[in-house]
Image: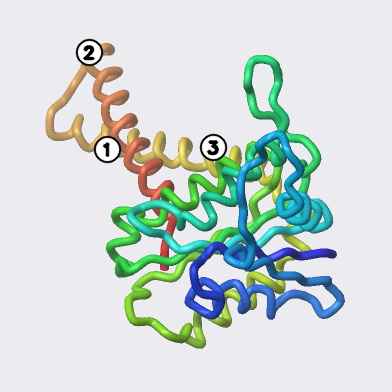
């Protein structure tokens, strides 16, 4: 398996470079690993002329089975280095139909892992989702190209941080070690439907219990009043559950 690391930060050995290296250190010995440091390239968009740098980067992306992309989060969005790379590769990552819709093309079926970091504390990141903008951009671009997501990794509280903790390095190596198995089964649509069914079933059960408690305090015998109270309780509960799981899905430890 060919694994390509793409580092979109200003320092090769900074926090994001260390996160990327830790993930790649955990891959199987037989895997072929390569790292691209985007700052080594003068990346410019296609202008109708030959573009040997984009040709080279495109060939590396095509040859890899799994991409591991790392970029810090600045002002709620990914670094300009990585964004410029994705912008300049836009015409190559997807194909466009006559209506201008982006469709998957040659990269369809590959897998990816995304990495980011921020100055925020773990609590602030969990509540406000400081790095969400970075991961959403990654997912939008790579999803449009037809890639399947394996995992995302975040490092918080990076101000003044020089070296990753042993715990974070171990987490990253574990992700790297799981690449081979997860890359084969990253389309977890069925799993998501099962999770959604479970959430709806639990929300329905809790709603029924709450409605019974409400009826004990304030008896409601009329059908439509029962119906309205059930819908209101169910909607509030389900909205809360969905919001919670959305935050947890973008947990940033």
Which residue is drawn at the image coordinates 79% and 76% (left, top)? 28
Q: Earlier in the sequence, mark 3 or mark 1?
A: 3
Kindly report the distance in space between the C-alpha atoms of the residues bearing marks 3 and 2. Answer: 29 Å
Q: Earlier in the sequence, mark 2 or mark 1?
A: 1
Q: Secondary structure at mark 3?
A: helix
Furthest toward the front, the residue is 49
| Residue 114 horizontal/vertical position (percent) | 57, 59
Front in this rendered view, residue 201 or 77: 77
Query: Where 121 falls versus 94 (above or below)?
Result: below
Residue corresponding to mark 3: 197
Furthest toward the left, the residue is 218
Task: Name the quadrant containing residue 93.
Answer: top right
Task: Name the quadrant containing residue 184.
Answer: bottom right
Q: Report the disc number at residue 210.
A: 1
Front in this rendered view, residue 187 or 190: 187
Residue corresponding to mark 2: 222
Image depth: mark 3 or mark 1 in front: 3
Q: Secondary structure at mark 2?
A: loop
Image depth: mark 3 or mark 2 in front: 3
**Would you call the spot at circle 2 few (<14 residues within 10 Å), some (14-19), or many (20 or more)?**
few
Q: Badges 2 and 1: C-beta atoms under 8 Å apart?
A: no
Front in this rendered view, residue 216 or 49: 49
Which residue is drawn at the image coordinates 76% and 43% (left, top)? 50
Q: Secondary structure at mark 1?
A: helix
Which residue is drawn at the image coordinates 16% and 25% (left, top)? 219
Query: Where 195 falls versus 164 (above or below)?
Result: above
Which residue is drawn at the image coordinates 84% and 64% (left, top)? 1
Disc tally is: 3
Q: Badges 3 and 1: C-beta atoms under 8 Å apart?
A: no
Q: Earlier in the sequence, mark 3 or mark 2?
A: 3
Side of 11 where 104 appears, left or right:
right
């Amino acid at each position: 398996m060919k694994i390509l690391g793409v580092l979109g930060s200003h320092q090769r050995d900074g926090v994001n470079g260390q996160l990327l290296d830790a993930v790649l250190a955990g891959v199987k010995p037989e895997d072929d690993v390569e790292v691209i440091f985007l700052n080594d390239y003068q990346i410019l968009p296609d202008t109708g002329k030959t573009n040997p740098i984009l040709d080279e980067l495109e060939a590396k992306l095509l040859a890899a089975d799994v991409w591991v992309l790392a970029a810090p989060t600045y002002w709620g969005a990914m670094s300009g280095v990585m964004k410029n790379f994705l912008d300049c590769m836009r015409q190559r990552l997807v194909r466009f139909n006559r209506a201008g819709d982006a469709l998957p093309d040659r990269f369809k079926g590959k897998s990816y892992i995304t990495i980011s970091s921020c100055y925020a504390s773990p609590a602030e990141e969990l509540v406000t989702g400081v790095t969400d903008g970075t991961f959403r951009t990654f997912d939008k671009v790579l999803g449009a190209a037809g890639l399947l997501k394996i995992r995302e990794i975040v490092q918080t509280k990076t101000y003044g941080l020089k070296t990753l903790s042993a715990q974070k390095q171990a987490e990253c190596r574990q992700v790297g070690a799981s690449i081979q198995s997860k890359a084969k089964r990253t389309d977890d649509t069925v799993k998501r439907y099962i999770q959604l069914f479970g959430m709806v079933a639990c929300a329905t059960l809790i709603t029924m219990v709450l409605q019974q408690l409400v009826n004990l305090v304030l008896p409601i015998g009329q059908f439509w009043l029962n119906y309205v109270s059930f819908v209101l309780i169910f909607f509030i509960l389900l909205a809360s559950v969905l919001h919670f799981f959305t935050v947890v899905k973008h947990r940033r430890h």
